């Protein structure tokens, strides 16, 4: 649900999963065949996992981090993992890069440049996200929703960003 001022987008679990299914349909209808899904952790983990299951393709993971301050709302220095975790040796062939959103676009742009320059076995690379903000400097190959007002997206699992073990002990009275 987008707030009236267009500054916040609140997404339920059901809506989140529906958007991932719509992303899968866009990719499927395009007819592009890929060998591996490479998701960017953390935002791309959930969409990557679901797409991996739908398309029955191996899931590789690359950790990235750029949101560190103010409970993840202030973008900081971009960190990219030196290694990719994959169940099949090294990542190769046609790769679908998955993240949750193209926010500023800097992370996706940097990852694609890294993959093209350092991973010669990748023969073709395309990108998929749920949301693309208008301010993004990068346009993914597949996206479900374009967001012209560039809202802050409140994903359904973000409550765990401020929940620690002590809060869970209190909640469950253990």
Image (tube, rainbow, N blue to C red):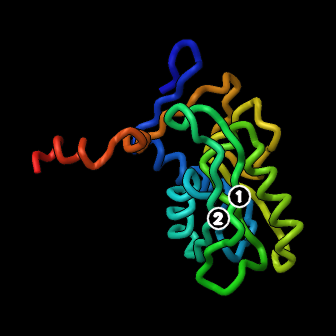
Secondary structure found at label 2: strand
Compared across the picture, whether 4 is left or right of 121 comes to left
Alpha carbons under labels 2 and 1: distance apart: 8 Å
Give the image location of residue 62, x and y in percent.
64, 64
Q: Which residue is mark 1?
A: 80
| Residue 59 drawn above or below residue 141 | below
Foreground mark, 2 or 1, reads 1
| Residue 172 drawn above or below residue 117 | above
| Residue 150 drawn above or below residue 83 | above
- Residue drawn 80% across the image and 53% down it: 110
Front-most of residues 113 and 94 = 113
Which numbered disc, 2 or 1, marks the residue that appears first in the sequence? Answer: 2
Compared across the picture, whether 165 is left or right of 115 comes to left
Give the image location of residue 99, x and y in percent.
63, 53
Q: Are marks 2 and 1 in contact (CB under 8 Å)?
A: yes
Give the image location of residue 20, x and y in percent.
54, 52
| Residue 140 drawn above or below residue 135 | below
Give the image location of residue 15, x and y in percent.
45, 41
Compared across the picture, whether 70 is left or right of 146 comes to left
Q: Which mark is residue 62?
A: 2
Which residue reaches farthest top? 5
């Amino acid at each position: 649900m987008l707030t009236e001022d267009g500054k916040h987008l609140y997404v339920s679990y059901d809506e989140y999963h529906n958007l991932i299914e719509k992303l899968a349909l866009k990719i499927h209808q395009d007819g592009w065949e890929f060998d591996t899904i490479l998701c960017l952790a953390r935002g791309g983990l959930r969409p990557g996992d679901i797409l991996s299951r739908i398309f029955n393709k191996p899931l590789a993971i690359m950790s990235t981090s750029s949101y560190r301050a103010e409970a993840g709302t202030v973008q900081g220095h971009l960190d990219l993992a030196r290694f990719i975790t994959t169940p099949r040796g090294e990542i190769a062939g046609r790769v679908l890069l998955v993240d949750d959103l193209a926010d500023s676009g800097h992370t996706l742009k940097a990852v694609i440049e890294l993959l093209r320059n350092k991973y010669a076995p990748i023969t073709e690379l395309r990108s998929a996200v749920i949301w693309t903000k208008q301010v993004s400097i990068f346009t993914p190959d597949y996206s479900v929703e374009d967001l012209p007002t560039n809202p802050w997206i409140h994903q359904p699992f973000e409550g765990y960003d401020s929940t620690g073990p002590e809060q869970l002990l209190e909640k469950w009275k253990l």
